[in-house]
């Protein structure tokens, strides 16, 4: 199957999946994507990521950290934007 990506904003170099947590699944991004998302969350434009997705990112990063799929530093990079 295919996924078409549309309406990608300029200066955004990552994609958030499970928009507004519509699906019942977790998303584990690759290390570079986690880094890019964290960098964006620490910018003045962080509000452009919907609040539900910001919560989802923290929850997913925490879950994947506890399962050994992402490092604690990745989780803290995501969560520390708060």
Image (cartoon, helix red, strand yellow):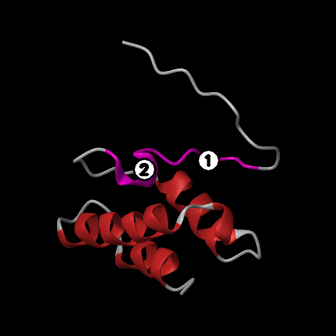
How crowded is the residue under tag 1: few (<14 C-alpha within 10 Å), some, or many (20+)?
some
Residue located 17% across and 65% down the image: 67
Horizontal and vertical percent for residue 57? 42, 64
**Which residue is outermost to the top?**
1
Does the magenta stretch mainly form a helix, a strand or a loop?
Answer: loop
- Apparent side of residue 46 relative to residue 27 in the rendered image (left or right): right
Residue annotated with mark 1? 14
Of the image marks 2 and 1, the number of the one nearer the N terminus: 1
Image quadrant in which the N terminus is located: top left
Horizontal and vertical percent for residue 41? 62, 71
Question: Whole-Å distance between the Cαs marked 2 and 1?
Answer: 10 Å
Given residues 23 and 70, the one toward you in this image is 23
Given residues 32 and 45, the one toward you in this image is 45
Horizontal and vertical percent for residue 56? 37, 64
Discs 2, 1 touching: Cβ within 8 Å: yes
Residue annotated with mark 2? 29
């Amino acid at each position: 199957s295919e996924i078409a990506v549309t309406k990608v904003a300029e200066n955004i170099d990552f994609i958030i999946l499970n928009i507004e947590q519509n699906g019942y699944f977790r998303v584990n991004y690759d290390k570079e994507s986690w880094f890019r998302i964290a960098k964006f969350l620490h910018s003045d434009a962080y509000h452009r990521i919907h609040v539900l997705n910001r919560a989802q990112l923290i929850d997913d990063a925490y879950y994947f950290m506890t399962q050994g799929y992402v490092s604690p530093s990745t989780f803290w990079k995501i969560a520390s934007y708060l």
